Amino acid sequence: MTEEFDQVKRIVVVGGGTAGWLVAARLAAHYELSSETLTLTLVESDQTGPIGVGEGTWPSMRTTLNKIGITETEFVRECGASFKQGSKFIGWSRGAEDYYYHPFSLPQDHAEENAWWSWQNLANNEPFADSVSPQPAVCDRDLAPKQISMPNYAYALNYGYHLDAGRFAGLLMRHAVERLGVCHIKDHLIGVESDSDGDIAAVIGKNYGRIEGDLFIDCSGFESLLIGKHFEIGKVDCSKYLFNDRALAVQVPYATELDSISSVTLGTAHDAGWTWDIGLQHRRGVGRVYSSSHQSDEQALEGLKSYLKREAPHVDFESSSPRKLSFESGYRSKFWHRNCVAIGLSAGFVEPLEASALVLVELSAQFLTDQLPAYRSGMDAVADRFNRQFTYRWTEIIRFLKLHYAISSRDDSAYWRQHKESDSIPESLRSDLARWNYQAPWHHDEGRIDDLFPSASYQYVLYGMGFQTRDPVLRSRSHARRLTQYRERQLRTQQAQARFCEHLPTNRELVRQLQSQSFSSVPHSAVERL
């Protein structure tokens, strides 16, 4: 093959929605598109819509939006977004009213000192997250993580977003097409054409006909038109670890325009799963996640009704239409095969706990941006690296999500009891739990510099749920110094908590301000944090 014909010059994204448009925008913002060098075409069906039930993001979304070229002010206005500072888990440990926070901010001085030891010895039964971070107190008051005077994407406390997925996809589409030069084709695909060597040569639109490409990105969602249906790449089944396979989702209006907007995703456990509750600007998104092996659809519907009766009594449930979602817990055995790479739901899905779906899209788009193969002859090596990296990431996510269930003290239903059975816990997690009985998670638990979950995340979940790590009998020579340092950190945490609670606006106040004002255009480095 000559160098000219070996070049990767035509990228085709199959499927729109958040995944398709995020990938297209990320690539188009980085590479100069032209008919001579590189073209990027996104084709999406005119017969099916996106899943779009509302989404939460990680803080990484701020970097992604900034690289794409969308200002934070525009994003918040266009997507009905609010500010998310972590998750609050209710009823996961013992049931009833117990709760803990998994905030996005790391513990004070996390790089130098393991906060567990000080908390275990000196915190006087104060919840772990509250002891090591000012963020839970901020979230208790539904405060925002920044002020209107701060620049786009700058912060006082680390944060992501709650957003309307449908509106987000629309913003990304307009930005990618009107500002970045992405070609948009609205057509229903009816076929896939292969080259003699097995690569995809073109996808066939019902009206448009052949759409040729050198690299095809499958963002077709659960349909998985290319990686699943065409190449028949199977899935790794994860249902033995994570049982949930259904969700009922509904949009809930606020009682009044003055209702507070939560700064965290609320996750409330029930006897066969959990219920998410996220606050956007104009509504809440509520969904009951459950295992069909442990609860019928009718029972789930009644459970959702009971939740809304308690948490949103102004809502007429009978007039709402909950949307039922069914999914299989698993991921592709291979994400990149020949000249096709799967991103988003086509690559896999487990459950919406900890909002990991969008971050995998972001990471996949980043990988493609950094390592896009210029030639087909070099694609297989890149594909092998992608497959190894994202297989690791999926196993990492499953391991972390399972932790939320495996250490629960709940035994009020078969669902919770079975989650604690040894054969339902990944071997790597079983090994870690045995070690964490005697040694708290710390930097040595982070196998790679790009691990998705730092040791602090494991600490927030473990000690939030009441896990016990035995205090070592031996005392180091630095014992007295560590006590002094802990008291200093505790004082700084309390001072930061008071400062933030005094000066930060509420989530509701900040999104209201953004309707008529914009975040500052001053560079991030020029602004001091609170």
Image: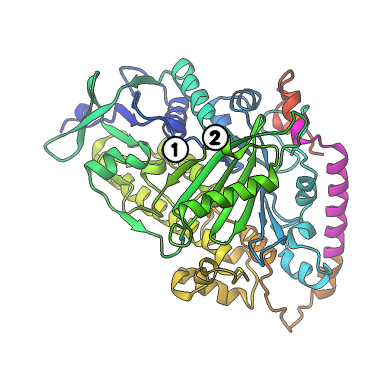
Q: Position of residue 294 (x, y in %)?
A: 47, 62
* Residue type for callout 1: Ala
From what the image shows, is residue 174 above or below residue 385?
above
Q: Secondary structure at mark 2?
A: helix
Is 4 situated left or right of 114 in this image? left
Magenta region's main secondary structure? Answer: helix
Q: Relative to 299, is 430 above or below?
A: below
Percent coordinates x, y for residue 459 in the rendering? 66, 63
> Would you name the residue on which mark 2 appears?
64
Tell me which residue sits at (26%, 28%) in the image. Answer: 189
x, y percentage for residue 487?
Answer: 87, 63
Q: Gap in Å between the C-alphas at discs 2 and 1?
A: 9 Å
Q: Quadrant of residue 188?
A: top left
Please state the extent of the stretch shown in magenta in the rendering: 486-509
Mark 2–mark 1 contact, CB under 8 Å? yes
* Residue depicted at 44% across the width and 57% down the height: 292
Q: Quadrant of residue 28?
A: top left
Name the quarter where the C terminus is drawn: top right
Q: Nearer the viewer, residue 196 or 270?
A: 270
Direction bottom: furthest residue: 473
Q: Locate residue 406: give its quadrant.
A: bottom right
Q: Is residue 500 magenta?
A: yes
